Amino acid sequence: MDNLAKDIAAGHGETLDTLAELMEVPLQERAEFYSRLQTNFSNIFTSTDIQASSRCP
Amino acid sequence: MIMKRGVGLLMLLFIFFVPAIIYPSEDNIYLQDLINKAIDKKIYKERYWYILLHYKKSISGLKSLVDDPAFFISPRGKNDPEAELIETINSLFKEYQNEQEDPRCRFPARYTWLKETLNIDESLMPPSACPEFEKFLKAINPKSATLVFPSAYMNSPASMFGHTLIRIDSTYKSKLMSYAINYAANTGDEGGITYLIKGLFGFFKGYFSILPYYEKIEEYNDLDMRDMWEYELNLTEEEVRRMVFHIWELKDIYSYYYFFDENCSYNLLFLLEAARPEVNLTDEFGQWVIPSDTVRLVINKGLVRDIHYRPSRSTRIKHMALYLNKEDRAVAMKIAGGTLSPQDIMNKDMNNAKRMLILDIAAEMTQYKFMRQKIDKETYQTRFLDVLTARKDLGRPEAALYSIQPPSRPDEGHASGKISTGVGIRDNEYYQSIIFRPAYHDLVDSLGIRDEFFKPVSWKIYSGIGREVLQDGKEHLLYLINPGFGFAKENKIAGIYFGFAESELRFSKRFDADYSAGIGLSAGILKNITDRWKVKISGKAMFYELGDRNKFYSSSIQQNYTMTDDIAFRVNLTRAKSYSEYWTEAEILLNLYF
C-alpha cells in the first residue's frame, strides 16, 4: 500500500503503527523500528512499483 | 421487478419444500411442543422478533421493511410475524445438504434468540454445522463497535445528506484492521436527475456490505476528502456479537432504498437495536432520516462513550499549509505537479521542518492527483517515489506540527429541521412570516471553498412553497424549485465570497400559463464577525423569460446571531425591483432548530 511507503518515508503514521502492531513490535521499540525503516527506505522500495513491493497484510 | 420477485419466490419454495427431511422421524412430538409453546407465549409478538425481521406498522398494516423474499422462511413472512416464526421453528428440524440452506447457519441471530426463548434442547435437533459462518465470525473477531459519520461532501449531490456506517472493532488497536458495515443503494452508473428520482421513490435496491475499514477511509477521507467522525459505542462484547449475527443474516439481502427515510442511516439503526433491544431507535423518526440526526439520537440514547476525529486529506493538507508562506505552498504544488524536482528544495537554504511540510503536502497531492486520474500510473509512481526518497532523509517531524484540532462536531451544530417565525415591514406594510423547513442546510452551511490546492464546484438546490408579491402588487402563494452552481473563495479579511449561476422554475395560479421560468446570477460575501455573528451581503438578478415574464433584481444584507445551538436570530434588509416596481423590506426572524 502506498500509504505505508509514505509513512515509512515520513517516519510516522497510522499505517506504520498498524504494521508495527501486526509484527508485534513492543511500544518502547517502535521509535527505533520506524527510524530503521526510514533509513532503509530505498532498500525496501527499490523500484517505482510501490504497489507490488509493499503489500500491506 | 415484479418478474424477478416471482422467480425469487419460486426458488425459495423449491429450496424449502423439496429437499427437506423431517427429523426426528417419529411424529415430531418435540417440534410440536415447541410450536405450541411459542403460540401459547405469543413470542412472535416480542420486540426482538420484530427487530430481527424489521417489522414495522404502516398505513397498509404490519410489514417488514425488508423486501427480499430470501429474508423470510415463510412465503407470508413479510407481513406475518406468527407464520414466519412457526415456519422458522419447523425449518430447524429439517436436514440440509449445505450451509446456505440451513436456517441455523443462515439466520444465527434468530436461531440464538429462539433457542434461548424456547429453551430448545439442541440434542433433539438434526445435526448442523456452519463452517462458513464460523469463519466469518473468526475473521471479524467482534469486540466493540463504532458509529462512523463521514461529513457531507459538498461537491456531490449524492452525498448531500451525509452518511453513516458502523465499524466493528476487534482486539487490534489499529482501526485499519477493523471492518466497516455499510448500507447503500446499488445505483450502478446512474447519476443526476435519474439518480435523484429513483432514490426518492425507491427504485434502487439497498444492500449491506462488509469491507475492510481502511477501504472506507480511502474512499471518504482520501478520495472524497470528507472528515470522518467516529463515535465509539458502549456496547458490550456480547451485544456486538449479537449485532454481527444479525449482519450475517442481512448478507446479500435487499430492501428498496428511499433517500429520505429507508436510507443508509435508518437501516443501521436496526443493527444497533439487534445489539441492544432495550434502546428504541427505529421509531424515533418521522418522514426524514438525516445521518447527522441519527448520530444525535444515538448520543441522546446514551450509546456513545468516546468520540474521535479523522481529518480528510484536504484537512490534512490545509493544516500543513498553515505553517508555510505563499511561496512555499507554490513550491509544494510545483513538486506535486511535476514541474519541480523534490531534490530542488534540498539544495535550497531552508530548514528541515519546512522541507518536511512541503514534501508531505507534495506526497498527499500526488496521491490525490492519481486517485482522481489527473496523472497516469507511471507518472504517479515515479513522482511519488521521488518525493518520498527526498523525504526519507529528513527524519520525523514534531508531533505537535501534525496534530489537528478537531472542528465543531456534526452532532453539536443545530439540528437539521427548522421553524422560523418573525415580523417584517415592506413598503410601510407590516407582515408576519413563518417558514418551515423539514431538512437540511442553508447555503451558508454548504459552500465548497476553492484555494490553491482544490477547486471544488459548489452547488445548491432550493425547493419550497412561499408567498411573494406578483404583478398585481399583492402577495400570492407559489411553489418554486431553484438549482444552481458556482464557486466560492475565502479571503482572510473579507471572508468568503461566492458567485452562483441560478435557474428557477415557479408555479402559481397567478402566473400567465401558471408558471414562470428563468435564469440568473447571484453573488455575495459571507463573513463571520464573531463565532456567533454572521453577516451575508448579496445581490441577485433573475430573468424569467418563459411563462410569466419578469426581471427581478435584489440586494440584501442578512445578519445571523446564534443564541444557543438550537436558537438563532436573523435580521434581513432587502431592496428589490420586480415587475418594474421597487420595494424595500426589513424583517426580524427567530429560528428554532429541531
Image: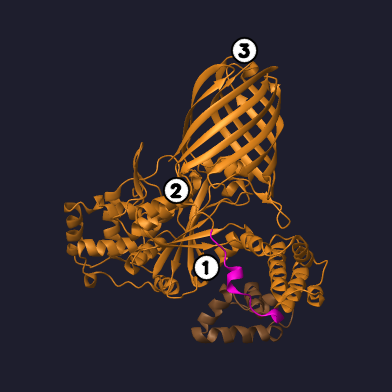
How far across and down, in percent of the image, does residue B411 sit?
46, 52
Letter of the chain that mark 1 sits on in the rendering: B
Q: Nearer the viewer, mark 1 or mark 3?
A: 3
Kindly identify the amino acid type of the residue bearing the numbered disc 2. Asp
Which amino acid, mark 1? Pro
Of the image marks 1 and 3, the number of the one nearer the N terminus: 1
The picture's colour for chain A is: brown
Looking at the rendered structure, which numbered label has been put on residue B357?
none
Q: Do callouts 1 and 2 mark residues in contact (Cβ within 8 Å)?
A: no
- The chain identifier of the residue carrying mark 2 reads B
Residue on which disc 2 sits: B293
Of tags 1 and 2, the one toward the viewer is 2
- Name the secondary structure under disc 2: helix
Q: Earlier in the sequence, mark 1 or mark 2?
A: 1
Q: Please check whether the numbered discs 3 and 2 fall on a single chain.
A: yes
Secondary structure under the numbered disc 3 in the rendered image:
loop
Crowd rating for badge 3 (residues with CA inside 10 Å; few <14, some 14–19, many 20+)? few
Contact, CB < 8 Å: mark 3 with mark 2?
no
Looking at the image, which is closer to me, B553 or A55? B553
Drawn side of residue B443 relative to residue B345, left or right = left
Q: Which residue, given by chain and number where applicable, does mark 3 sit on?
A: B472
Tag 1 residue: B212
The image quadrant of residue B170 is: bottom left
Q: Nearer the viewer, residue B547 or B488?
A: B488
Element marked by disc 1: strand
Calculate the distance from the C-alpha at mark 1 to the C-alpha at mark 2: 26 Å
| Residue B199 among those drawn in magenta | no
Quarter of the image where one finds residue A32: bottom right
On the same chain, marks 1 and 3? The answer is: yes
Is B491 located above or below residue B211 in the figure? above
In the image, residue A29 above or below residue B332: below
Magenta highlight range: B392-406
